[in-house]
Structures are given as structure tokens and as C-alpha cells.
Amino acid sequence: MKYVAIIGKTGTGYSAHLPDLPGCIAAAGTFEETRALIQEAAAFHLEGMVEDGEQIPEPIYAAVEVEVEVPASVHP
């Protein structure tokens, strides 16, 4: 299955979470490390759900990029 991972820059690196898997998070110093860790975290999270007899959720989130024109700043 493919789940959406949201990765954001923090003050010390990057953090990630999966909206479809609440509580599944990861953080690291680089984007690449964070991406790898959230993938591992998701696999571990799903394994735990199976062991606990929980149903694996179908992915319901999708991600798209939108281009937005930034308004010009108004300076007094």
C-alpha cells in the first residue's frame, strides 16, 4: 500500500507523519534520512497493528502540490 507522508523542516532537521496512520512519526537531520525512517516506521506500525489484531486502514489521503501567487508586500 502507498500512504502519504508529510515531511516538514524543523529547527533541527525534519519530521514526518502519516495522516492515515495516527501516531506514526519519524524525525532526522536530513530529508533523506527522515524519508527512510518514516518508511521503516510505517512498516513497523503496520506490523504492530497486525499483531494486535487491528484492521489495516486503507489510504484515504492524497497529496498534491498547488502553485500559489504570493501577493506583493506592502511597505509603509
Image (cartoon, rainbow, N blue to C red):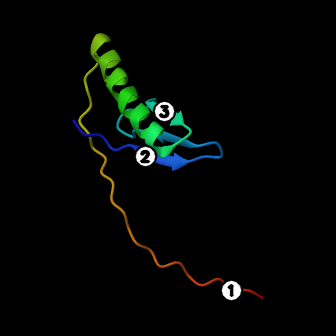
Q: Which of marks 3 and 1 is nearer the N terminus?
A: 3
Residue to which mark 1 is pinned? 74
- Classify 8 as above or below 24: below
The dot on residue 26 is: 3
Which secondary structure lies at badge 3?
strand
CA distance separating discs 2 and 1: 32 Å
- Classify 65 as above or below 27: below
Q: Is residue 60 left or right of residue 22?
A: left
The residue at 46%/29% (across/down) is 23
Residue to which mark 2 is pinned? 6
Q: Which of marks 3 and 1 is in front?
A: 3
Q: Which of marks 2 and 1 is nearer the N terminus?
A: 2
Query: In the image as oriented, which residue stretches furthest toward the right?
Result: 76
| Residue 36: % across, % down | 40, 35
CA distance separating discs 3 and 2: 10 Å
The residue at 32%/25% (across/down) is 43
Q: In this view, does 11 lie to the left or right of 47?
A: right
| Residue 38: % across, % down | 41, 34
CA distance separating discs 3 and 1: 39 Å
Q: Which of marks 3 and 2 is nearer the N terminus?
A: 2
